[in-house]
Structure formats: C-alpha cells, structure tokens
C-alpha cells in the first residue's frame, strides 16, 4: 500500500496500522487513498495523540463506543447506517483538527454530545460520515462567587446539576428534567425544565460560549459576534459550529423546594382537573410549575399532576388551592427536599437514591420510541378532552400503541421574552407544550412501522386543538416527519417547512447567519439550516 509522501509523516506507522484493515478499502481503488483514509492521515499529521481516540469500524471498541450514547433502541438495528469512524477529542485542538481534516476531505461530520436526539441525527445518516463525539470533553467549573459555571459540551445535565449542588445549596440551573442529556445538544436546542416559568429556558441563561468554527478557529462570544452567538442559543449547533464549552449564569433557589405527583382517574375528576389546569397553570405564580401527564394504565386513563415549587409546602398548598381547588392538594401530597434531590424525583429515580447517582454515565437499557410535539394556544374544551382520552384508550386497547402525553405549562418568564430575542420562538401566547411519546419494547420493522404510524395518527387527530400556520414544533423534540432530507443534503424548500415550525420568523435570520458563517454548508444534518439563497 503506497501513500503519497508517507515518509515525511512521523506518525504514519500508527495511521497505516489503523488504515490497513479498514473495510472500505476492499471496495475503494487501492492506489488512491479514499477521502476517509486521507481524513485519518490528516488527523495523525495534525494531532497524533488524537489517533488513540479514533474508532474505525474494525476497532474492537467501535460498536460499544457507538452504542454507549444511542438513547433510542430504534436506531440500534442492522439497518441503521453507521459512521466510518468515531473521533472522540480529548482537547479542543482535536476538535479543530477534526473540522479542518473533514472539511479538506469533503467528509461530513455529525456532532454528538449526549446522543439524545429523538431522530438519532447525531449518529446516523445515509451519507458517508464521521461522528465527532464530545464525551471526553466534559469538564465543569462552578464559580459560586460570580454565580456562573463553565461546562463542556460532553458533560451531562446530571453531572452539571451535581457539581452546582455540591458547590452551593442555593444555586441551580434551569434545564431539562432528564439528567443523561448532553449539555452540547440540549442547550443549543433551547433546553427547558421545571424552572422555565421562573427563569426561562437554558438558552436564555447562557453568557458566553467557546466554539470551533468552520475554519477550525476557536471563537468566544466577542470573537464570533452577536449573530452567531444568537444562532447557537436555540438554533441548533449542528448547523453553525462545534460547541466546546458554555459559560452559564447560575440562578438562585431556596434551600428547600417542594414536589408532588398526584394521579387522577376519570372517576376522580381527571377531565375537570385537565380543563381547569389549562386555565390556571400558565398563569400561576412563576415559582410554581405543574405538569400534566395523561396516559393509559391497565386500560383506563390516568392523569398525573406533577408539581415543582421554589419554596416550602406551607406556602404552596394555599397558593394552589386558591386557584385550583379541583386539585385538592394537601400537605401530605407534598415532599420537601433540596433542589438537587428534586432533580432525582423529577427524573423518576426511586425515593432515597443518593445524589451521586447523577454522576453515573452508564445508561440502562433503552426503549424504542417515536415522539412528536405541539403547542396549544387556546383552552381545549371538556368535550374535546374526552375525545382525546377516548383516543388514547382506543390506541392502547385495540392497537397496542401506548401513547403518553406530557403537557408543560408556559407563561411567567416565557411570556416576557420576545420571540426574536433567540431562535427559540415559542413565547407569549402559548398555554402549553405537548409532547407525545409512543414507546415499545418489541423488535422488528413491522412493529416499528405500526407504532410510528400510531404516533402520527395521534398527532393528526390533535390538529384542531393546537397551533396553526405554522403548526409549531420544538427543536429539541426533533421530528423528521415535519420535513427532512433523508439524502443528507439540505434542500431549501424542505428546510422552510421544518424551519418555520421550529423557529417561526427566526428561520430567515438563521439562514442569514448561516450564509455568513458557513456559506458552503459544512455543518449539516438531515434537518439543518441551509444558507440563505442570495
Ligand atoms: C429521555 C429524554 C428526556 C428529554 N427531556 C428533555 C427536557 O426535559 N427538556 C428539553 O428541552 N429537552 C428534553 N429532551 C430533548 C433533548 O433536549 C434533545 O434531544 C437534545 O438535543 C439532546 O442533546 P444531546 O447532546 O443529548 O443530544 P445529541 O444527540 O448529542 O445532539 C442533539 C443535536 O445537537 C447537535 N449537537 C450536539 N452536540 C453539539 C455540539 N457540541 N456542537 C454543535 N452541535 C451539537 C447534534 O448534532 C444533534 O443535531 C429529552 C430527550 C430525551 C431522550
Ligand atoms: C501534513 O502536514 C504537513 C505540514 O504541516 C503538510 O504540508 C501536509 O500536507 C500534511 N499532510 C496531510 C495528509 O494532511
Ligand atoms: C421520548 O420521550 C421520552 C420521555 O421524555 C423519552 O424517554 C424517550 O427517550 C424519547 N424518545 C426518543 C426517541 O428519544
Ligand atoms: C461535595 O463532593 C465531595 C466529593 O464528591 C463530597 O465528599 C462532599 O460531601 C460534597 N459536599 C456537598 C456539600 O455535597
Ligand atoms: C395495573 O395493574 C397491575 C397488575 O394488575 C397492578 O399491579 C397495578 O397497580 C395497576 N395500576 C394501576 C394504576 O391501577
Ligand atoms: C380497555 O381495556 C380494559 C382492559 O384492559 C377494559 O377494562 C376497558 O373497558 C377497555 N376500554 C375500552 C374503551 O375499550
Ligand atoms: C380532598 O382530599 C382530602 C384528603 O385526601 C379528602 O379527604 C377529601 O375528600 C378531598 N376532597 C375532594 C373534594 O375531593
Ligand atoms: C449505573 O447505572 C447503570 C444503568 O442504570 C447500572 O446498571 C449501574 O449499576 C450503575 N452503576 C453504579 C455504580 O451505580
Ligand atoms: C410483526 O411480525 C411478527 C412476526 O412476523 C408478528 O408476530 C407480529 O404480530 C407483527 N406485528 C405487527 C404489529 O404487525
Ligand atoms: C435514510 O434512508 C432511509 C430510507 O429512505 C430513511 O428511512 C431514513 O430515515 C434515512 N436516514 C436519515 C438519517 O435520514
């Protein structure tokens, strides 16, 4: 095997070892290195130590590294296309090398932080691609005196929450409920949790960022300018740059917060509760966050009412009952704990789990699922709620598709921020965000097709009750049904469809920023932002 100029590369021996057994060599013309070979040579040339954290398909660890951060079992099948290599930088210079070498060799990358993308777009594509995997870049520094923290993209929310809680019992950060999410993908897609009515979404609380741009340059906020800094806070990093680190603003929480989870059956008034909730939950004091969780258990409907309050139950109970007597909340329903402990409660850890569990990066076995989202702007009348419940029961009973819903109230701080302040546009005027989740354990494409079809059916039937023109959707709840380019190219017309749903009028500005910072569209996936056509 002859590589041009190989003699001058000090680390070529290692590269050769790596390359000689690569599967694609069998089919590619062996007299010329493929773009993948050249990419790997380039990496070795620029950062030799990086080669130790490159996993090609023949590396014995390839499968386990690939799967370690695949959250959805739907994408762990023999049919799921795999990357030609996974590059896992240990240093920001490795990120620079990966970008430069991929771009020089026309090789697409997919950036992965926590791997929770609902459609797996951080690790699957029909084009030839490399995963830029951020899991080694996960340092966290908490500076309580200045009420800020620095967190790298590969850190999980659980690690971040733990570190904040460890440094202070009166500080926190407003972000997602699921603690295995990566801060890289989560913050750049918006990031909401049970403090959004008080403090907004994660993106609203980012002060600065370190990114690697399309030319392999390291930029901070001052260097990247306000347009790019705007775009990465809710517009999706996959279209703009590699986010290496965030500087975030810590928020204040009391030493004790209160949580509850009260289920209602239809007989216990679930419909009345859900009807009143729509009118009350988006208007309650911003220290209160009450989520509804309608689902079908044992063939009957159950609505869980799950609460979070920045304060003690003594204050919460009268506050809720004054406005929401249907809930009949009592002190006995409430549990008081530290904010860090409440993180475990909301992420469904068993009571009494030590907070150190948040540092465990090993994920348990995952389900297959298909999720979708909607925004509701007007109260759904009781008669229609009953139709929705009937549909959920019918889906579970006669088609074996268990659909559960999460209703997350907006209002408070979410209504005070202008739609154009950040790419995330879903602000005033929204009563709540709906997430639809269909999950299953069975394997097989026919089962998958059936369950996905039922999720779409549920979404179709909800059309009369949700936002229109555009029918809004939440970027972090990525959904390829609303337009995607399965080819891995980015078609402007297609992009306008999902772009308007995710970003409303901010889509236009996103395409302008894209044209400015990445006119050749290097940073992309099947649902990314295309550069504005001149
Ligand atoms: C169980 C579960 C619970 C969830 N709960 C919530 C919740 O409470 N609130 C909420 O808002 N969302 C929630 N989500 C959605 C979640 O926020 C998104 O899936 C988010 O994109 C995950 O980020 P990640 O880094 O884990 O994912 P990844 O799959 O790694 O990345 C997601 C996207 O961001 C891009 N990206 C990742 N890292 C970088 C980077 N460093 N630079 C540039 N681009 C990057 C990827 O290329 C991909 O397009 C949940 C998801 C799951 C699976
Ligand atoms: C390796 O680096 C040298 C010097 O920086 C450069 O001239 C050469 O083109 C590089 N080779 C590859 C394959 O990137
Ligand atoms: C759908 O959402 C649920 C609950 O938030 C989550 O457990 C599941 O992993 C999500 N599905 C996908 C495809 O990520
Ligand atoms: C902080 O973390 C250290 C090391 O994990 C632990 O020993 C200590 O008890 C923690 N302190 C607090 C206040 O949580
Ligand atoms: C559902 O049925 C199972 C098994 O009969 C039972 O253990 C469980 O408590 C039931 N759940 C509810 C919410 O009724
Ligand atoms: C759904 O199935 C349960 C038993 O699993 C049954 O009790 C209930 O009546 C069924 N409901 C409908 C609407 O079919
Ligand atoms: C409210 O809850 C209490 C205690 O659980 C119960 O005794 C009472 O009957 C409930 N009232 C209503 C109207 O449901
Ligand atoms: C970490 O989590 C995994 C999956 O839930 C579990 O199997 C494992 O025992 C946990 N490890 C520790 C040290 O708790
Ligand atoms: C899928 O196929 C298997 C085996 O062919 C069959 O047993 C099962 O009922 C099918 N499931 C659906 C939902 O069609
Ligand atoms: C790849 O192509 C298949 C078949 O058309 C499609 O089902 C799949 O969604 C595509 N993958 C991506 C990531 O778009």
Image (spheres, rainbow, N blue to C red):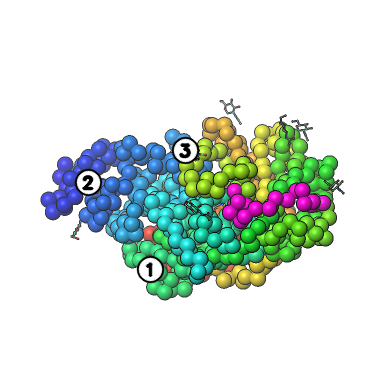
Left or right position of 151 against 473: left
Instruction: Say the numbered circle drawn on residue 238.
Output: none
Neighbours of disc 2 within 10 Å: few (<14), some (14-19), many (20+): many
Residue at position x 33%, y 57% in the image: 91
Q: Secondary structure at mark 3?
A: loop
Q: Position of residue 131 (x, y in %)?
A: 38, 49
Question: Measured from the top left, where is residue 519 in percent x and y?
Answer: 39, 66
- The residues colored magenta run 328-344
Q: Which residue is mark 1?
A: 219
Q: Is residue 479 left or right of residue 215?
A: right
> Observer-nearest residue: 128 or 532?
128
Where does the image place residue 436, in percent across and percent down from the top left?
A: 64, 47
- Rounded to the nearest angstrom, the CA distance separating label 3 from label 2 is 29 Å
Q: Please identify the quadrant where the C terminus is shown.
A: bottom left
Q: Sequence-wise, which precedes: disc 3 or disc 2? A: 2
Splitting the image into 4 quarters, where does residue 252 fall? bottom right
Residue 525 at least partly seen: no
Label 1, label 3: how far apart the Cα atoms are: 35 Å
**On the image, numbered disc 2 is attached to which residue?**
15
Does residue 366 appear to the left or right of 283 in the view shown? left
Q: Is mark 1 within 8 Å of ligand 1?
A: no
The one of 40 and 516 positioned closer to us in this rendering = 40
Residue 338 painted magenta: yes
In percent of the image, x 69 and y 58: which residue is there?
Answer: 309
* Above or below 365: residue 279: below
Indicate the position of residue 438 as horizontal and vertical percent values.
62, 41
Look at the numbered disc 2 and give the secondary structure of its residue.
helix
Q: Which mark is residue 76?
A: 3
Q: Nearer the viewer, mark 1 or mark 3?
A: 1
Q: Residue at 24% across / 57% down in the picture? A: 46
SS at mark 1 in the image: strand
């Amino acid at each position: 095997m002859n590589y041009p100029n190989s003699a001058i590369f000090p680390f070529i021996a290692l590269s050769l070892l790596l390359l000689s057994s690569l599967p694609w060599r069998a089919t590619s013309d062996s007299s010329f290195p493929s773009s993948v070979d050249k990419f790997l040579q380039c990496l070795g040339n620029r950062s030799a130590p990086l080669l130790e954290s490159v996993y090609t398909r023949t590396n014995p660890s390839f499968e386990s590294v690939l799967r370690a951060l695949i959250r959805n079992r739907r994408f762990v099948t023999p049919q799921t296309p795999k990357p030609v290599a996974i590059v896992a930088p240990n240093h920001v210079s490795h990120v620079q090398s990966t970008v430069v070498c991929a771009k020089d060799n026309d090789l697409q990358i997919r950036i992965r932080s926590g791997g929770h993308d609902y459609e797996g777009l951080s690790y699957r594509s029909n084009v030839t691609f490399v995963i830029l995997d951020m899991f080694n870049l996960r340092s966290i520094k908490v500076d309580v005196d200045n009420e800020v923290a620095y967190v790298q993209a590969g850190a999980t929310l659980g690690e971040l929450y733990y570190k904040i809680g460890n440094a202070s019992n009166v500080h926190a950060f407003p972000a997602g409920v699921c603690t295995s999410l990566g801060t890289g993908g989560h913050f750049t897609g918006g990031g909401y949790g049970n403090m959004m009515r008080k403090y907004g979404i994660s993106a609203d609380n980012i002060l600065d960022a370190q990114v690697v741009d399309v030319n392999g340059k390291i930029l901070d906020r001052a260097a990247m300018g306000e347009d790019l800094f705007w775009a990465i806070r809710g517009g999706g990093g996959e279209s703009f740059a590699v986010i290496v680190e965030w500087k975030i603003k810590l928020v204040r929480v009391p030493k004790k917060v209160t949580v509850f989870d009260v289920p209602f059956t239809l007989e216990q008034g679930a419909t009345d509760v859900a009807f009143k909730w729509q009118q009350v939950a988006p208007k309650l004091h911003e220290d209160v966050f009450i989520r509804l969780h309608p689902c079908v258990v044992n063939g009957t409907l159950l609505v869980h009412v799950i609460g979070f309050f920045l304060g003690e139950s003594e204050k919460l109970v009268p506050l809720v009952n004054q406005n929401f007597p249907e809930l009949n909340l009592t002190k006995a329903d409430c549990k008081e704990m530290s904010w860090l402990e409440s993180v475990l409660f909301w992420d469904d850890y068993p009571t009494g789990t030590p907070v150190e569990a948040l540092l465990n990066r090993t994920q348990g076995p995952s389900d297959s699922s298909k999720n979708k989202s909607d925004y509701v702007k007007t109260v759904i009348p009781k008669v229609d709620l009953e139709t929705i419940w009937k549909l959920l029961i019918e889906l579970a009973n006669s088609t074996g598709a268990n659909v559960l819903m999460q209703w997350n109230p907006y209002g408070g701080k979410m209504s005070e921020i202008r739609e154009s302040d950040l790419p995330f546009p879903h602000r005033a005027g929204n009563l709540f965000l709906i997430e639809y989740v269909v999950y299953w354990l069975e394997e097989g494409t026919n089962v998958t097709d059936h369950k996905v079809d039922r999720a779409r059916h549920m979404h179709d039937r909800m059309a009369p009750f949700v936002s229109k023109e555009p029918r809004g959707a939440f970027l972090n709840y990525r959904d390829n049904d609303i337009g995607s380019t399965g080819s891995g190219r980015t078609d402007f017309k297609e992009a306008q469809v999902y772009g308007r749903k995710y970003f409303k009028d901010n889509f236009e500005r996103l395409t302008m920023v894209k044209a400015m910072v990445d006119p050749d569209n290097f940073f992309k996936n099947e649902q990314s932002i295309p550069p504005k056509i001149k």
